Image: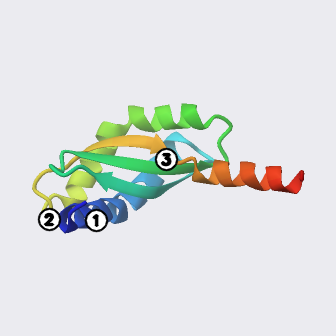
Amino acid sequence: MSIRTEKISRAVQRDLAPILSRVSQRILPGELVTIVEVKATADLGLAKIYISILNAKDKEKSLHTIELHHKEIRQELAHVIGKRIRKIPTLNFYLDTTMDHAERINSLLENL
């Protein structure tokens, strides 16, 4: 990943976090959505947003709800970073399963 791509990824993560938090409070009440990582492609046309969702009964359903609102989220992001970044990347959301794996490993270790 180039330095420019890393800078764009960090900027998207920093500026997208409060937007996603605000939108998720409205569309997913009681659930906490945080951005774990952002990976932008080399051409900056796509940003892969890895999110963690806490207090969700069905994380896949919550992810789908966020994906349904991706245009609104991208539009708000464009409003915030549009002056600094010429091309606003398309946002693709993915569940970050790192915590789930860690919990599973911990439970397996406890059962030994």
At horizontal 48% and vertical 58% (from top left) the residue drawn is 36
Could you tell me residue 61's position as x and y percent?
56, 31
Q: Do the numbered discs 3 and 1 sit on residues whose CB atoms are within 8 Å?
A: no
Q: Is residue 52 above or below residue 56?
A: below
Whether pointer 1 and pointer 2 mark residues with C-beta atoms closer than 8 Å, the reply is yes
Residue under the point 35% across and 57% down = 16
Q: Secondary structure at mark 1?
A: helix
Q: Residue at x 23, y 49 (%)?
A: 41
Q: Where, by quadrant of the figure, is residue 69 drawn?
A: top left
What percent of the width, then of the height, locates residue 56? Answer: 65, 42
Amino acid type, label 3: Ser
> For the residues carrying marks 2 and 3, which lies nearer the camera in this image?
2
Res. 11 mark: 1
Q: Quadrant of the N terminus?
A: bottom left
Amino acid of disc 2: Arg
**Residue 106 as seen in the image, left or right of residue 68:** right
Of 54 and 39, the residue lying toward us:
39
- In the picture, the disc for residue 84 is 2
Disc 3 or disc 1, which is closer to the eye?
1
Up/down of 84 relative to 69, above or below: below
* Comes first in the chain, label 3 or label 1: 1
* Mark 1 vs mark 2: in front: 1
Alpha-carbon span between mark 2 and mark 3:
25 Å
Name which of mark 2 and mark 3 comes first in the sequence: 3
Mark identifier at residue 24: 3
Q: Residue 88 in the image: x percent, y percent?
A: 18, 50
